[in-house]
């Protein structure tokens, strides 16, 4: 039975107490003659290495007793010169077996059974310790794996560039970070040209999905991150939305499937560095879209080819028309029209449908001001499957042009002057170890520790750090999307629409200006005293038309001699406008990016215009 076994095991290993009270230490021969019942069982589990000379029959690997060869020699206090010294080879070792065990010899003398129980109880921690070692070893191996390859390795080969910036620690690696990865730049590599691309179009045309797909194809979002999004989207019965989650990061956007704020991300090709600005398509969020378009060099108009969807977006209330017009007003010169959802069952990569969409769009875009030969490029694609975004597809043999990403890479460079005055319209601001501002540098160049002036408040600020698309740099040129940490100004003192300038060349600020306005859509007439909302660069301000100066003939450009009493839809006029607060602006002739504006009222775009002259305030 187990109890007998335990008693025998205890007596065999601990020795018997003699009549005079001294301890009899068992020799190796005595250990050999232990009862069959447990010795055989242990022998089966762990055979003894025969080549061990001194410990031929000692079962080192036996599970219950782990001999600790390096333990300090156990010498009982009551027998300093006792039998402990007699057995030269075996005795010492037999004692060492128990060197780490907390049993009391006196208690063993008085009650052998209680002592044995104590010894047996002491065995369990050793087994646990064994297990702990195994776990620790496994963890060490796990931690060691990434270090053999690149730092942060073991994430899969298809991680793309930048995976080495993930944390090395095994624990942190488990946590998912949906941030786009940062591509490390070689110190000697020439700076790639920065291009800001805004995705515009009607709600549900697939703008965010295409953005997410591009980020995946260029290695900016890991496969496992997308798989996580896919699982979460499936739980919400929104399987086709998972790609858009790479750009729609807040919960409200994900639940409704609608972009609200302008999403930001970036990707690189061989020649250029692109910033994606994912504008909202819903008509309620057009002001946000204008802010996004004002930072863009290039617009991508996304059209849904699905039956019914294209028509809805292109009708008078649809956002396809409004967005194209606003992009042109915001100063976007080049437009790529992506005809999306070509894989839909109602379309099936049909050339007829593609041509039908194209025929309807070209006259409208021409009217807005784009040149169909130079400024517009059409291409079919599928955002959900990624077809024709990076690689050409076999089932669309009728399209012979480049796919989307290679086409972006092949575009000519933009002319930008880095020696002009510093102009950085502020898009957003927040607190993070100081005051941080976001915006696109329109002209000039900024470097660390530079002293700049925040207009129209005339606050002198210092640039503490400079991030271009989340990569820290020492200086930045025009066209780059920047995050600046500033010293000398509080976050509350800044508003979107303020401008960072250099002290030698400040931008103009004021409240009254003369402008040429085109009335696009307005049911009734517009008279002096009419109020609207002015969108100029990143600034949004209430404005009043204080006087109508003259009408301009659309064809000849001639100005009327008399002052008009009112203007109506499709007319062009020169008017004097006055804003509620002081804003930063320039004339269109001097600085086009800060001289274009849009007037909106009741959720519609009423007029577009350009600043002709700044009128100094009398007071």
Image (tube, grey):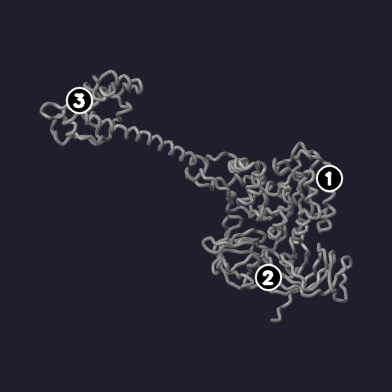
Q: Is residue 431 visible?
A: yes
Residue at 88%, 68% in the rendered image? 553
Q: Is residue 37 left or right of residue 522?
A: left
In the image as oriented, which residue stretches furthest toward the left? 20
Q: Which mark is residue 298?
A: none
**Among the 4 quarters of the image, the one containing residue 400:** top right
User: Which sits earlier in the primary sequence, circle 3 or circle 1?
Assistant: 3
- Quadrant containing the C terminus in the rendered view: bottom right
Q: Which mark is residue 355?
A: 1
Q: Is label 3 in contact with label 1 (beta carbons under 8 Å)? A: no
Judging depth in this view, the residue of 244 and 223 nearest the camera is 244
Q: Position of residue 334 (x, y in %)?
A: 76, 55
User: Which sits earlier in the primary sequence, circle 1 or circle 2?
Assistant: 1
Q: Is residue 100 left or right of residue 478?
A: left
Q: Which residue is mark 2?
A: 584
Q: Secondary structure at mark 1?
A: helix
Judging depth in this view, the residue of 565 and 16 nearest the camera is 565
Judging depth in this view, the residue of 209 and 386 nearest the camera is 209
Q: Is label 1 in contact with label 2 (beta carbons under 8 Å)? A: no
In the image as oriented, which residue stretches furthest toward the bottom? 619
In the image as oriented, which residue stretches furthest toward the right? 556
Distance from disc 3 to disc 1, alpha carbons, whole Å, reads 99 Å
Residue at 54%, 40% in the rendered image? 155
Distance from disc 1 to disc 2, alpha carbons, whole Å, reads 44 Å
Residue at 56%, 39% in the rendered image? 156
Q: Is residue 269 visible?
A: no
Judging depth in this view, the residue of 11 and 499 nearest the camera is 11
Q: Which residue is mark 3?
A: 26
- Quadrant containing the N terminus in the rendered view: top left
User: Which sits earlier in the primary sequence, circle 2 or circle 3?
Assistant: 3
Q: Position of residue 228 (x, y in %)?
A: 58, 42
**Among the 4 quarters of the image, the one containing residue 158:** top right
């Amino acid at each position: 039975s187990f109890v007998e076994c335990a008693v025998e095991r205890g007596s065999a290993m601990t020795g018997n107490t003699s009549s005079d009270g001294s301890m009899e230490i068992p020799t190796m021969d005595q250990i050999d003659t232990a009862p069959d019942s447990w010795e055989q069982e242990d022998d089966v589990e762990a055979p003894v290495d025969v080549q061990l000379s001194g410990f031929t029959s000692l079962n080192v690997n036996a599970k219950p007793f782990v001999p600790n060869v390096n333990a300090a020699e156990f010498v009982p206090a009551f027998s300093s010169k006792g039998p402990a010294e007699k057995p030269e080879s075996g005795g010492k070792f037999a004692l060492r077996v128990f060197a780490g065990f907390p049993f009391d010899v006196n208690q063993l003398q008085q009650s052998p059974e209680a002592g044995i129980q104590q010894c047996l109880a002491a065995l369990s921690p050793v087994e646990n310790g064994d297990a702990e070692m195994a776990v620790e070893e496994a963890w060490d191996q796990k931690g060691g794996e990434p270090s053999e390859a690149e730092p942060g390795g073991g994430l899969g080969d298809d991680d793309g560039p930048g995976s080495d910036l993930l944390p090395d620690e095994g624990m942190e690696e488990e946590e998912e970070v949906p941030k786009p990865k940062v591509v490390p730049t070689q110190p000697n590599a020439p700076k790639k040209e920065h291009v800001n691309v805004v995705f515009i179009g009607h709600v549900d045309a697939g703008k965010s999905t295409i953005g997410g797909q591009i980020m995946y194809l260029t290695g900016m979002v890991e496969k496992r991150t997308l798989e996580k999004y896919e699982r979460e989207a499936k739980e919400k019965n929104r399987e086709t939305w998972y790609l858009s989650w790479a750009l729609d990061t807040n919960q409200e956007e994900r639940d409704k499937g609608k972009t609200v704020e302008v999403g930001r991300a970036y990707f690189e090709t061989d020649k250029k560095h692109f910033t994606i600005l994912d504008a909202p398509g819903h008509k309620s969020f057009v002001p946000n879209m204008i802010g996004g378009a004002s930072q863009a060099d290039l617009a991508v108009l996304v059209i849904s080819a699905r039956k019914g969807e294209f028509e809805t977006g292109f009708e008078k209330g649809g956002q396809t028309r409004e967005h194209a017009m606003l992009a042109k007003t915001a100063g976007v010169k080049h437009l790529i029209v992506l005809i999306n959802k070509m894989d839909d069952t109602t379309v099936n990569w049909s050339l007829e449908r593609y041509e039908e969409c194209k025929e309807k769009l070209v006259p409208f875009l021409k009217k807005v001001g784009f040149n169909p030969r130079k400024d517009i490029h059409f291409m079919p694609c599928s955002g959900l499957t990624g077809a024709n975004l990076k690689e050409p597809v076999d089932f669309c043999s009728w399209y012979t042009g480049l796919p989307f990403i290679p086409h972006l890479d092949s575009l000519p460079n933009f002319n930008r002057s880095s020696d002009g005055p510093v102009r950085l319209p502020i898009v957003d601001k927040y607190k993070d170890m100081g005051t941080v501002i976001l915006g696109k540098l329109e002209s000039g160049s900024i470097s660390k520790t530079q002293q700049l002036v925040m207009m129209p408040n005339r606050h002198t600020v210092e640039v503490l750090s400079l991030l271009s698309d989340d990569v820290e740099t020492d200086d930045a040129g025009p066209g780059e999307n920047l995050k600046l940490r500033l010293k000398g100004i509080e976050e509350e003192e800044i508003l979107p629409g303020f401008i960072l300038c250099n002290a030698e060349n400040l931008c103009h600020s004021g409240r009254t200006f003369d402008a040429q306005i085109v009335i696009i859509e307005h049911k009734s007439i517009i008279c002096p005293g009419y109020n609207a909302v002015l969108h100029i660069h990143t600034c949004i301000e209430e404005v009043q038309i204080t006087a109508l100066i003259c009408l301009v003939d659309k064809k000849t450009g001639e100005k009327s001699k008399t002052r008009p009493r009112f203007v109506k839809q499709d007319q062009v006029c020169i008017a004097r406008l006055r804003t509620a607060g002081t804003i930063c602006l320039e004339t269109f002739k001097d600085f086009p990016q800060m001289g274009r504006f849009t007037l909106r009222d009741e959720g519609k775009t009423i007029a577009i215009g350009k600043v002709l002259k700044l009128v100094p305030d009398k007071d």
